[in-house]
Each structure stands twice: as C-alpha cells, then as structure tokens.
Image (tube, coloured by chain):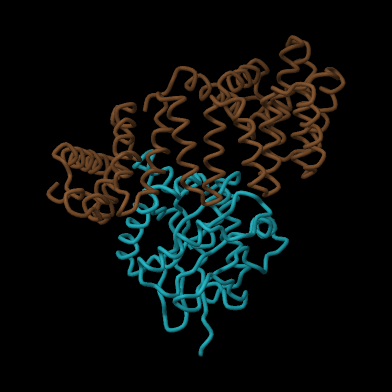
Chain colours: A brown, B cyan
C-alpha cells in the first residue's frame, strides 16, 4: 500500500536522526522536526523519542533555539516516551519541572497519574485521576486512565464498569467501544464484544478495521444452527474489500471461512450457496492464490491445504 | 505408569521468547510443533500466531492452525500444543480462551498429550538478564485423561531437548534477542497484512 506524504516525511526524518554524523548526535532542527511529526501524526516511537528528545531537552542550545511553548510540549511528549520505556528517574524529573511551571494544569496531573501507574502505585494514580474528574467531570483523558488502572490491576470487571460509565456520556468514541470489546473478549463474553464492534461500525462506517472486527466476531458466534451470522459476516467482509480496493488478505480469508462453514455445516437449502456467493468465493480464492504465487510461492501449498478454497479453482 | 515427559527444543524456547520480546506490550500466542516418542513429547518448533489479541477470536485462528498443520506434516511433525504470553506482567493465569484453543488443538491433531505453554512474564525478564538462568520461564499444562482439565505439569518433567542444559538454551535465546532477531521473526498477524512475510521463520533461529 502506498504511504502518505506525512509518513514518508517521518520515515526520512527518523532516518536522518538515527544515522546522523558527528558522534551520532542528530542536529537539533532534525530532532525538533521528528518530534513535531510524531506529535502531529500521533505516532508512538517511544525508544527513539526518548533517546533523541531527552538529549534535546538537556541541551542548552535547544533552549535558546526553541520557543517556550514548544519546549514544554516536547517535555510532555518525551515524558510519555520515557514512561513507555520505563525510565522512571528521567520521567520523574520532567514531571517535577512541568508541575512547577504549570501548577494548576490538569494535563500535568494526568502525567503525574501516569507516572504513579508506571511505578505500580495504582492507589495514588486513582486518587490523582479522581481529583481531576472532581474539577472537570468531562475530562476524557482522566476517565480513560481510570479504566486503565482497573485493567492494570487485573480487575477487568471494574474496567468494564468504568468504561461503560464513560460511554454513557461519550457514546461516539469508537476507540473506547473497541477497548470495551477487547475487555469483553478477555472475559469470554463474545456476544457483548460483537455488540461493541457493531457500535464502532456505526460510528465510523468508513473505517475498514471495524468492519473486519465485527465480521470476525459474527463468524466466531456462528454455529451450525445460526449460520445466518456467517452470512451476515460475509456482507461485512465484502465491505472491507470495497473499502480497501480488494487488498485485504484478512477479509478474503474471512469470507472463504464463512462460505466454507455455510457449505459444510448448513442443513438443506440453507447450505446451498447462491450464485453470487459462489462467484465471490471463486474470486477471493483466485486472488489469494495469485497473491501467494507472486509474493511467497513456498506457502501456496499450505494455503491450499486449509481446505477453504472452493473446489475447482 | 512411566513418567510423562516433555522436551522443548532450543529453537522453540528462543522463538517464543523472541515473539514475546517483539510485542512486549501485549499478548502473544502461537502453536507448537512436535512428535511423541514413547512417553516423551518432543516440541521441536513453534509458529508465532498473533500479537493482536482479537485475532484469537476470528477465522484467522482456524486458518493459521490449518496452515501450521500442513507445514508440520512436511516436517514429519504434528501440531502438539499452543503457547501464550499474557498481556499483564503479573498475570500468571491460564485464560479460558487459551484453554479453548488447547482443546481444539488436542482434538484436531488427535494428540492426547497436547500441551499449553504459558510464558511467565516475570521469570522471562530475569531469564533473559541471566538472574534465573537455570529455570525455563514457562509453565506447561497438560491433560491427564480424556475428561480431565488442564493441569500444571511438574517442573521436573519439562526438560530441554537434545540433552542441553537450561543455561545452554538460555544462551541461544539471549543471543537471539541481543542481536535483534525479534525484528526478523514474523507472526501470522503480520503475514495477513503482507503475505510476503513468511511465518515459517526458517532462517530466524538456527540452533
């Protein structure tokens, strides 16, 4: 798949930072650009951001060159990266500096909470997030972190409860529905998970990954007596193929599995594939085989061994 | 009755560890390939399946299992188990979904001695650092009878294949991680995004 211009810019900048000359120290302007691209694109590259960013924060030259607001933004960004890589001492130092500069900021409080979480002090983290919510009930970040605390403690039921309360208010947050779905899956509650994925599809019908997950969940729920679910899944996998220009291997496999299940498990007339369904299966099989033939022919035999390809292709 | 033994190859141990290292932030899983010799099950290799937890609840699981079975057949092996690394570092429990996959592997391969290998996340860290170099960071579960449940297998009954010591196996695994081999290891989640990525990983660990 072709990459977006912003992705290309990020890859090029990252390459220049990683392979910088003079002693491995990337020039400040390059690092600044890398951090900006990551912030704008919401890209998470903790190891690189922590390494280059920390050096930037500590350099006197950078402090002269950067304006105040960007410098603090970078501090926050680097701090999250440090939490990701587990460098607690450096992170603590930045949190202290930020708290001093912005004593009343809820954004810094969230960071303080995240630091507590990273240290395993979930009680303290919960306290911090609840304090933020007392001030501002609609603070989405704090609410979501509160759910993460429950999850981190291994208390999935409480995480579900917190997330449901959140979704009562912010019911159009597709990412939160997706997270709720995966919590349900980990609790072996497939039906509930499927419902959540359906919400995601309704909120973002243009996003193929939600159609895929919803179709996957429908297929998993289908049994020989509920094959209409597999038929429904076929519809959603087809949408994925429309949205991705026919490039989704996942959707093709899903389609073939569904149609195979209908063919082999159905009783009487329900097991008969319509002409359109047969054509669809044949087309997917052909495309998959061509894809393997071109990119990794050694695996073609294993694809055929799955038995989901319709006979005669 | 003779003691039921399980032997893990250095390749299996290394690949599971590389998979867990590559996706350290989430859960990973895959299947085990092996054979049975009298009372001993020898796990020779493994195929990394997923790092996206939701893939376990999708048709992709069946597809990956069927393709692994076909591949195992070419090596004279069977799919003899499943491995799992949980997301939370202190979560040492065998999840219901993992047991379900274990049951399905056991039935599909007609392999009554099928096993589940659960990665112990805490021990995994100290194993790699060398603090606990004498203990494999896994718990192995098996079923004693047809109607039985998954039970932990005594540590003494799980050994390294080929007479290697745990220390020697650790060296292979740690060397792999240190040289960044996890970047070359490919799982089925990646394969389904780009079929050019070969899930057999034949060149990743040569032990």
Q: Nearer the viewer, residue A11 or A279?
A: A279
Q: Nearer the viewer, residue A220 or B185?
A: A220
In this view, which residue lies farthest toward the bottom?
A: B1
**Residue drawn at x 21%, y 55% as measured from the top left:** A267
Residue A247 vs B201, above or below: the answer is above
**Residue A293 placement (x, y as % from top left):** 23, 43
**Residue A237 placement (x, y as % from top left):** 32, 36
Inspect this view and state whether residue A107 appears.
Answer: yes
Image-based side of A77 in relation to A253, left or right: right
Q: Nearer the viewer, residue B82 or A123?
A: A123
Image quadrant where residue B175 sits = bottom right
Image-based side of B18 in relation to A285, left or right: right
Q: Nearer the viewer, residue A289 or A218?
A: A218
Inspect this view and state whether residue B19 appears.
Answer: no
Image-based side of A286 in relation to A239, left or right: left
Image quadrant where residue A13 sits = top right
Residue A227 vs A75, above or below: the answer is below
- Marks counted in the figure total 0
Residue A24 vs A39, above or below: the answer is below
**Residue A161 placement (x, y as % from top left):** 64, 40
Residue A237 vs A272, above or below: the answer is above
**Residue drawn at x 36%, y 54% as measured from the top left:** B62
């Amino acid at each position: 798949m072709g990459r977006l211009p912003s992705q290309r810019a990020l890859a090029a900048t990252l390459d220049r930072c990683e392979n910088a000359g003079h002693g491995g120290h990337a020039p400040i302007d390059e690092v600044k650009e890398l951090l900006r691209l990551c912030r704008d694109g919401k890209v998470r590259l903790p190891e690189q951001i922590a390494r280059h960013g920390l050096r930037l924060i500590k350099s006197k030259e950078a402090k002269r060159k950067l304006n105040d607001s960007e410098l603090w933004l970078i501090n926050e960004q680097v701090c999250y990266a440090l939490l990701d890589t587990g460098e607690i001492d450096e992170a603590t130092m930045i949190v202290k500096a930020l708290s001093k500069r912005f004593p009343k900021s809820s954004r810094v409080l969230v960071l303080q909470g995240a630091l507590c979480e990273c240290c395993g002090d979930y009680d303290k983290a919960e306290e911090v997030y609840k304090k933020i919510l007392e001030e501002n009930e609609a603070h989405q970040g704090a609410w979501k972190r509160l759910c993460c605390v429950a999850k981190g403690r291994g208390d999935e039921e409480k995480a579900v409860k917190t997330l449901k309360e959140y979704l009562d208010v912010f019911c159009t947050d597709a990412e939160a529905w997706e997270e709720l779905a995966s919590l349900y899956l980990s609790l072996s509650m497939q039906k509930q998970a499927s419902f959540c994925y359906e919400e995601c599809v309704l909120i973002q019908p243009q996003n193929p990954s939600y159609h895929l997950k919803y179709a996957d969940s429908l297929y998993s729920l289908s049994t020989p007596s509920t094959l209409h679910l597999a038929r429904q899944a076929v519809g959603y996998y087809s949408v994925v193929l429309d949205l991705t220009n026919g490039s989704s291997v996942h959707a093709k496999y899903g389609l073939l599995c569904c149609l195979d299940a209908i063919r082999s498990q159905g009783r009487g007339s329900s097991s008969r594939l319509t002409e359109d369904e047969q054509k669809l299966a044949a087309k997917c099989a052909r495309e998959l085989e061509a894809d393997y033939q071109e990119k990794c022919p050694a695996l073609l035999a294993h694809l055929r061994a799955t038995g989901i390809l319709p006979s005669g292709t | 009755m003779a003691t039921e033994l399980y032997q893990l190859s250095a390749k299996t141990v290394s690949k599971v560890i590389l998979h867990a290292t590559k996706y350290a932030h989430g859960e990973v899983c895959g299947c085990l390939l092996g054979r049975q010799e009298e009372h001993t099950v020898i796990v020779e290799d493994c195929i990394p399946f997923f790092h996206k937890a939701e893939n376990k609840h999708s048709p992709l699981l069946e597809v990956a299992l069927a393709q692994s079975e076909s591949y195992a057949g070419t090596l004279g092996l069977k799919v003899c188990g499943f491995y799992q690394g949980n997301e939370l570092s202190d979560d040492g429990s065998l999840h219901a979904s993992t047991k379900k996959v274990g049951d399905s592997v056991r039935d599909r391969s007609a392999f009554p001695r099928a096993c589940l290998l659960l990665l112990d996340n805490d021990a995994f860290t100290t194993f790699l650092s060398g603090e606990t170099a004498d203990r494999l960071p896994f718990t192995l579960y098996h079923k004693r009878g047809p109607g039985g449940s998954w039970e932990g297998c005594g540590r003494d009954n799980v050994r390294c294949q080929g007479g290697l010591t745990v220390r020697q196996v650790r060296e292979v695994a740690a060397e792999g991680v240190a040289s960044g081999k996890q970047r070359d290891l490919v799982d089925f989640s990646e394969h389904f995004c780009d079929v050019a990525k070969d899930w057999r990983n034949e060149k990743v660990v040569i032990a």
